[in-house]
Amino acid sequence: MLIRLDHKPAIDNIHKYPQSIVDRLAVLLSAGAVAEADARRKGFYDVSDGDRVFFIHISPVSGKVFLLASWRVQQVAPLVARAASAGAFECSARLA
């Protein structure tokens, strides 16, 4: 899904992440962010931006964004990613 906020989002940085992380999230939400809704909690999302993921809550009452967590993800090599998505794994090792 795509989340795009029409206004500059007010972000509550409850865990005191560096301002650069908060600014990156604000720009992302203003421009339009790819997000995955949390299946168990309404208004909670994982928002991805390259090598970083943000876990946020958007208040349905105020529209305020709560930055709950953020972490870096390792990029998977393109060849490995293609093989994984195709389900094509081969093993040349032999068990004795």
Image (tube, helix red, strand yellow):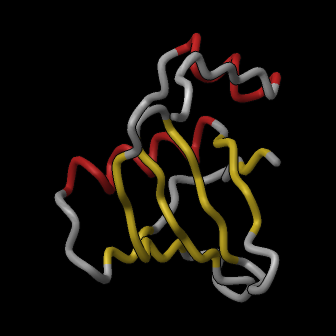
Q: How many marks?
A: 0
Q: Is residue 56 left or right of residue 32?
A: left
For image coordinates 67% across by 75% down, the residue present is 44
In the image, residue 13 sits, relative to residue 47, either above or below, namely below
Counting from the top left corner in percent of width and height, residue 10 is at 46, 68
Q: Quadrant of residue 75?
A: top left
For image coordinates 58% across by 43% down, the residue present is 30
Task: Please state which of residues 75 and 84 is positioned toward the viewer in this rendering.
Answer: 84
Q: Quadrant of residue 83?
A: top right
Task: Please state which of residues 51 and 94 is positioned toward the viewer in this rendering.
Answer: 94
Task: Please state which of residues 79 and 47 is positioned toward the viewer in this rendering.
Answer: 79
Q: Residue furthest top?
A: 79
Q: Quadrant of residue 95?
A: top right
Task: Please state which of residues 15 and 96 is positioned toward the viewer in this rendering.
Answer: 96
For image coordinates 47% across by 32% down, the residue present is 50
For image coordinates 65% across by 83% down, the residue present is 59
Q: Is residue 13 left or right of residue 43?
A: left
Counting from the top left corner in percent of width and height, residue 82 is at 69, 17
